[in-house]
Amino acid sequence: MIDYKQWLENIYSSIDSIADLPSQEEIWLGKSKKYVSDYGETISDLYDSFCFGNDFWKEQHLSNFNLKEDLLIELKTLKRMIDIYDEKIQITKLKDEKILKDPEWIFITKQATKIVEIWKADNYPIPSYS
């Protein structure tokens, strides 16, 4: 049986990390003594580890999340933005330093922030470590 609460918590956690530009700068650029990551891993967590690219959107799952329409719209917008951006990154091979300053990436982080705010306001599951 699928634990939809845990799945949502994982999605939230990934989106919250996308929203946190200062943390990305610290972790992606090797300034953190505790964590190491990069753009590719950040997107892979959301899309591959937590199935945001495909399975999340299947009706058989989506209906079990019980998400309000406003959050769904913002999630779909974020997905579309990341899909387009990731294609750009695959072609241009932008390095993390450039991504962090790219207005398009900054806009994506703002969309993620918007989702985090809605998520909290609507009392969806949030991991206890957030």
Image (spheres, rainbow, N blue to C red):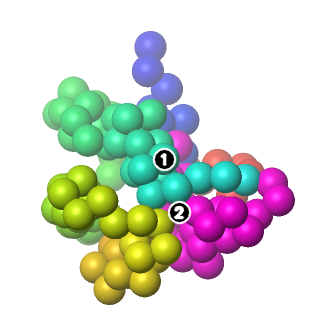
Mark 2 element type: helix
Whether residue 75 appears in magenta in the rendering, the answer is no
Q: Is residue 28 left or right of residue 130?
A: left
Say what secondary structure mark 1 lies in.
helix
> Residue 16 location, x and y as percent?
53, 63
Q: Residue at x 26, y 31 (%)?
A: 55
Horizontal relation, residue 48 to residue 119: left or right: left
Predominant secondary structure in magenta? helix
Tell whether label 2 touches label 1 (CB within 8 Å).
Answer: no
Q: Which mark is residue 16?
A: 2
| Residue stretch in magenta | 10-34
Q: Which residue is mark 1?
A: 41
How many numbered badges does the structure rendering display?
2
N-terminal-most mark, 1 or 2? 2
- Per the rendering, the mark at residue 18 is none
Res 9 → quadrant: top right
Toward the viewer: 7 or 66?
7
Depth check: give the residue in front, 7 or 24. Answer: 24
Q: Residue at x 41, y 43 (%)?
A: 44
Check disc 2: other Cα within 10 Å, few if <14, some if 14-19, many if 20+.
some
Question: Viewed as shown, does residue 10 lie left or right of 102?
Answer: right
Left or right of 51? Residue 124 is right
Residue sitting nearer the eye, 17 or 69: 17
Type of amino acid under label 2:
Asp
